Image (spheres, helix red, strand yellow):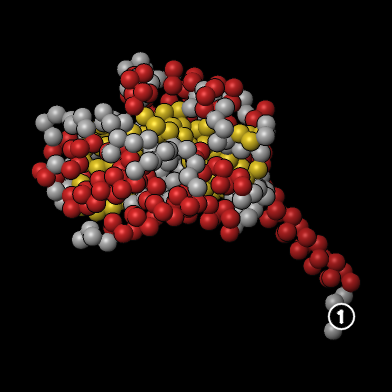
Amino acid sequence: MRMPRLTAFLTATAVFVSAFTLAAQAAEEVHVLNWKGYGADEPWAVANFEKATGFKVVNDFFNSEQEMLTKIRTNPGLYDVVMINAAFNDQAMAGKLIQPIDVSKLSNYADIAKDKAGSPMLNHEGKVYGVPWVWGLTALAINEKSFDKPPTSIAEMWDPAHKGRVIIRDDAVEAVQFGALASGQNINDIKDMEAVKAKLTSLMPQIKTFWSSENDWNQMVASNQIDIGTYWSGSADRAKTHFKLPVSLVIPQEGSVAWLDAFSIPAGSKNVAGAEAFINYMIDPKFYVEWVTKVGAPVSANTKAVDALPEDAFNRKVMGSPDVAKRIQFQAPVTDEQREKYLALWQELKVNVK
């Protein structure tokens, strides 16, 4: 039976209006992909951003860089902003997963440290594919209850006194780079993989478990199950500042793995304007100082944000120390061949951990 003309017209109009409304709502949402508990999903930050811009933040999370790449690859058009470790930005760009960013739309971009803004990992053929956000270290963190004074060397993890009370992140690349540091090598130019393997093999009997999230690490120290382990500098700061846990960061004499995290806009973003507004908010000194004070955070790539901290603040006094700068090695991109080799080694080593 044919629908009366007026009824058909009204029905078609309703469908059109509904579709238009849904599209408009989607355009007002900013879909962000990031680590959970990593600044972008702080309730107060989300509320402040939404109030200031009118955009609504929708957060999603990942637990590894490979999971992040998979999510943006298999969900084209879903995300507007993604946080990418700069060492993985090349891989995302080569896969056409991210698009160039018009930094002229970001008023706070001019205050990004020149060495961070000019990173060849984030800039390609005169175009910017990642806006530096924060940087930090994969260093050591200790359970203060287990030490009279903080250790100074990576070798502390091998001390028999800590057997069964050591923790390390379940990440092949990070583990191998840590093994490189422990064997006196450059993390980006490992000459002796056998030495790395030997170091990590001898560490396995010390391991309590492997961690993949801040919550894993914090729960272990809260229940006094661990003494020492690899940890991110910003996470150690949050553990002490926000969760009041007995945690201290140690930057060992052998050095630490340094990383630079940046925000990118995925290819096919439905809300580029919202993405630009979100990224600009995240690199704003006002947001950063509040984040550090309330929660704890890595070091901002924005020089004005760091300068706004008290002179004795850890992220200014310690992380900005020339002595620390000499001891850290920033991660560079890893080839697929290297990653596969690291993963094979890591899986072989983990089998022997009970």
Identify which residue is drawn at 56% across, 27% down.
Answer: 117
Left or right of 191 on screen, residue 203: left
Look at label 1 and name its amino acid: Arg
Give the quarter of the image for residue 324: top left
Left or right of 179 on screen, residue 55: right
Q: Nearer the viewer, residue 299 or 14?
A: 299
Which percent across, then down, holds residue 322? 36, 18
Q: Residues within 10 Å of mark 1 (few under 14, many from 20)?
A: few
Residue 214 in sight here: no
Q: Residue furthest right?
A: 5
Quadrant, the N terminus:
bottom right
Q: Residue furthest top?
A: 311
Identify which residue is drawn at 77% across, 62% down.
Answer: 14
**Residue designated by label 1:** 2
Which percent across, then down, holds residue 205? 18, 53
Q: Residue furthest bottom?
A: 1
Tag 1, which secondary structure?
A: loop
The correct choice, above or below, for 126 with respect to 38 in the image is above
Quadrant, the C terminus:
bottom left
Which percent across, then down, holds residue 84? 51, 42
Identify which residue is drawn at 51% across, 44% down.
Answer: 88
Q: How many marks?
A: 1
Which percent across, then down, holds residue 177? 36, 42
Residue 37 in sight here: yes
Identify which residue is drawn at 34% across, 54% down.
Answer: 346
Q: Nearer the viewer, residue 270 or 24?
A: 270
